[in-house]
Image: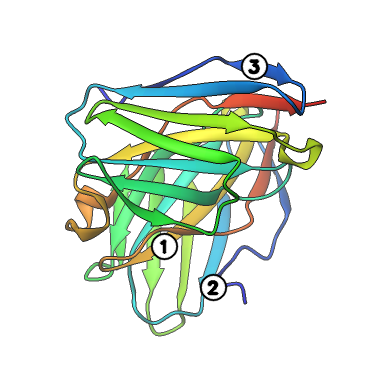
Amino acid sequence: DTEVTQTPKHLVMGMTNKKSLKCEQHMGHRAMYWYKQKAKKPPELMFVYSYEKLSINESVPSRFSPECPNSSLLNLHLHALQPEDSALYLCASSQFGTSGGQMGNTQYFGPGTRLTVL
Amino acid sequence: DQQVKQNSPSLSVQEGRISILNCDYTNSMFDYFLWYKKYPAEGPTFLISISSIKDKNEDGRFTVFLNKSAKHLSLHIVPSQPGDSAVYFCAASAWGQNFVFGPGTRLSVLP
């Protein structure tokens, strides 16, 4: 089973709203990732959690706030977003994270949340 | 500076024929390479990977070839099927580093 689930599938929010994206995996993976993908572009890494600790923050604005309540769950809290933040937000997990061996680095992606900011 | 390049934005192939998708990289420290397939509005699906100690890896209809001296890898799909129509991303990583994705190639398999 290589399933990563994400909720909601679609989200429309105003610039003053606060919302959260949720990601879950039950593969026992110890690293989880948030990516942002704009149309016709590759995924861009935002955050990496390794063993439930934030290990990488790719200079993401503070209006995006990640949280890893446990090894299976990853949230992305959104506040005061801008229209240009509209994108597909992807969650991924891998067995060992960036410090793992090569096969442990394979990332498995969820279906994504399509976010529209009005 | 694009470390992973996929110079063909799109490719059209007849059903039943071979599809060859290409990827070039510049970072000689990369030691693990992957191909992902992506349908619109879905997350990327892992297809196949190859370690830098190998030059070929095969899984069913999918074969990845790695030419380290040329810093080039390719994905062969044989035979191509209409369901293979998607965007294909090449990704690479170096030990202890995160993935770098290429810009993607849109494959269309024509019936």
Residue drawn at point x = 66 percent, y = 17 percent: A11
In terms of depth relative to the viewer, which is nearer, B107 or A12? A12
Q: Position of residue A92 (x, y in %)?
A: 39, 37
Q: Which mark is residue A76?
A: none
Crowding near the residue tagged with mark 2, few <14, some 14–19, many ≥20 C-alpha atoms within 10 Å:
some
Check the image and report above or below for A87 versus A72.
below
Q: Position of residue A42 (x, y in %)?
A: 61, 50
Q: Write down the chain letter for disc 3.
A: A
The residue pinned by badge 1 equals B92
Q: Is residue A7 left or right of residue A100?
A: right
Q: What residue type is disc 1 on?
A: Ala
Q: Where is mark 3, residue-wise?
A: A10
Mark 1 or mark 2: whose residue is earlier in sequence:
2
Q: Quadrant of residue B38?
A: top right
Of the 4 image quadrants, the one containing the C terminus of chain A is top right
Q: Are marks 1 and 2 in contact (CB under 8 Å)?
A: yes
